[in-house]
Amino acid sequence: MIKIMTKKIKEKEFKLKVEDLTNKWKRALADYANLEKRVGQEKSDFVKYANACLIDKLLGVLDDLERAEAHLKSEGLSLALSQFRSVLKTEGVEEIKVEGENFDPEKMDCSEMVKGAKNKVIKVVQKGYFLNQKILRPAKVKVGSPSKV
Amino acid sequence: MTKIIGIDLGTTNSCVAVMEGGKPKVIPTSEGENLIPSVVEPVKNLVGRVAKRQMVLNPENTIYSIKRLMGRKITDEQVEKTQKMVGYKIKAGKNDMAVVEIEGKEYTPQEISAKILQKAKKDAEAYLGEKITEAVITVPAYFNDAQRQATKQAGEISGLEVKRIINEPTASSLAYGLEKKKAETIAVYDLGGGTFDISILELGDGVYEVKATNGDTFLGGDDFDQRVIEWIVAEFKKENGIDLTTDKQAMQRIRDAAEKAKVELSSSKETEINQPFITQGKSGQPLHLTMKLSRAKLEELVDDLIDKTMKPVEACLKDAKLDPKKIDQVILVGGQTRMPKVEEKVKQYFGKEPNKSVNPDEVVAVGAAVQAGVLAGDVKDILLLDVTPLTLGVETLGSVSTALIERNATIPTSKSQVFSTAADNQPQVEINVLQGERPMAADNKSLGRFILDGIPPAQRGVPQIEVSFDIDANGILNVTAKDKGTGKEQSITIKGSTGLSDEEVDKMTKEAEKHAEEDKLKKELVEARNQADTLVFTAEKTLKDAGDKADKKDKDEVEEEIKRVKELLKQEDLTKEKIEEATKSLSEKLQKVGAAMYQEKGKESPPASGENSKDKEKKKTGKKGDKEDKGKAEEGEVVE
């Protein structure tokens, strides 16, 4: 009698163990499959936005070059800058148009309040850019306030 | 089984992490960043980065540093200090608890914090693709009951069941797995953007308890930035006689440049601060800001701030009645601890290397995720997988070591590759199983050898021998070689290929690094030889095939080149350049013969439509490894 009981218990334990292992195996395979999907998505995102970091750095230099352009009336410099902008455009970089618009924190960063029409962008302090329709750098703007002196 | 997320709800920034595949992963926000600024505009319902962008526009409605008000009464000293700093209104709410008032409406700190937690929840759900209802949230060790309750409430308001509130220093200890190392006492040095905290933890009953805490709630990285800004302004005034503090735009640029310089000096000894057209001079001419800041100068500027952190550290240790040298482990938390001088001071004081390998901005969230994983039952009963510590491969033509399984590959695993013979009518191949990182077979360890024979006579490179490596979960390696043509196979079983001690693995890896340059040259030389060898073989075959079709003069030239290369290869002392030069010369002469062959063919039958003989010429280049028919493979090369 005891022999049969032990056998039955052992069988039951064995069945549970198999079930447990099967579940763990399935889980591991599922994690793997999910990882593959995530990696696939990340790869395609990477291709699209890999340049974002590099372009962000270049935008800082572009800012300074445009400051130079404003001061030096040099045709050569303007032509070179025009080329630079053209290259950026082909990489999917687009300037965020904000002049005279209402302030939108999704696209703009308010750096100062100045006298002007309420909530309107009075001056662009630093240009903002999209990269492939995604915000790369928000525009830094001065926003109007009628009560400011 | 839904995942439980871990949230570091910080004063300046918040961070979310979760356990995935047994490892903690920081969850990026919808903006693609790892940190959420703890800023809320409740009227327009803006949270995080977007709320921060309109702070200047809207100072009365934009709430930041709300953590300073959590669970505190209006009369609290912290609350009074905060009111002096911020642009929004703080007043007494129910039971005299501090609340904020915006456009006549009252918000409790819990409600404001809940908005941050809500964003964390939403971003986590987007990233994981599943609903999240539970979280572990961290709080400073010094938070009292009211403050902890408030944090729990904030979670509930945001729709999260708070499974546990854990202390920030304890979370960082979990991130480093220190409870597994059974560290008795831990010191956590947390220098963030706006606050400094020091905590001493003690292991008791398998759990870390906070023994003592201290700190300075108004000391952080922002103060370090401020010192740099002041220095820049002073230097500029000295050089140009102009005070930049009156120019808001210039100050904004200087603020950004100062922080950037500070960060750069954590990895460089010197940095340049370059801001052209910063302002205009008295006569309207443009002025530029250019100065160099050295790490030594920066350290001089902030020395007293770093010293200021050590006073609370001393007081804390006194409270805990512990000697600094007796602390088992030290952890660095918070972005400002990346500064080498800060690390140095901490190391000096405690007399040991601090733990800093986990990103100091994320370590608390990571620890919260680890705790969340334990509560979710993720981390229990994990099947620990081993890795193979050193690269495994076989010896190929030229005594080169060709890898099949790279080191640190998780096991069990298997990999196969097809090889071939090196000589005509070669009847057998010897498989020499190698372990190690060196490119030359002789420098690696031979784990075993065996022979597969019975290979039918064939030209070199024709037979297909598939070599398979299989390591099981116990680290036992099975190597099989199979002749795909005859089906004949031979194998060897090697035990203990993963059973090397850490020191041995370390030694072998360091040896490989040390000899990397010379090994590279050796391997390149061997490869050049192999290429030359193959080209000679191809050239001889081409000459035979060409027969009468090619010009005798061209053929003779090729014969001469073949002889020259053969003689060269007999020499012992060769450079890669010499071989490559001879190979190139032979290749060029060979192309003429090859071209002639095709021209002849062109005369006999017209080329297929769309192609002309010129195109065909281009395809035949006679470069190394160029196969005339796809069936050939070379030893050491992969064949599809």
Image (spheres, rainbow, N blue to C red):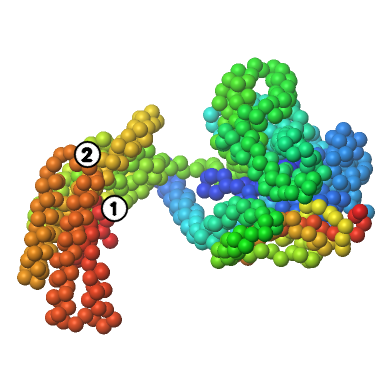
Front position in the image: B35 or A87: A87
Residue shown at the point (66%, 31%) measured from the top left: B298
Callout 1–callout 2 Cβ contact below 8 Å: no
Q: Position of residue B398 (x, y in %)?
A: 20, 44
Front position in the image: B417 or B271: B271
Q: Type of residue at label 1?
A: Ser
**Quarter of image, res B534:** bottom left
Return the disc, 1 or 2, that comes first in the chain's sequence. Answer: 1
**Quarter of image, res B524:** top left
Disc 2 is placed on an element classified as strand
Residue shown at the point (17%, 78%) measured from the top left: B602
Q: Position of residue A14 (x, y in %)?
A: 42, 48
Front position in the image: B550 or B30: B550
Q: Residues within 10 Å of mark 2 (few under 14, many from 20)?
A: some
In this rendering, position of residue B526 left or right of residue A144: left
Q: In this view, does A41 lie above or below B65?
A: below
Residue A11 showing in the rendered view: yes
Q: Type of residue at label 2?
A: Gly
Q: Quadrant of the N terminus of chain A?
A: top left
Q: Residues within 10 Å of mark 1 (few under 14, many from 20)?
A: some
Front position in the image: B452 or B569: B569
Mark count: 2
In this rendering, position of residue B512 left or right of residue B332: left
Q: State the mark number for residue B448.
A: 2
Disc 1 is placed on an element classified as strand
Residue on which disc 1 sits: B416
Q: Position of residue B592 (x, y in %)?
A: 17, 66
Residue shown at the point (68%, 33%) measured from the top left: B191
Q: Name the chain under label 1.
A: B
Residue B185 showing in the rendered view: no
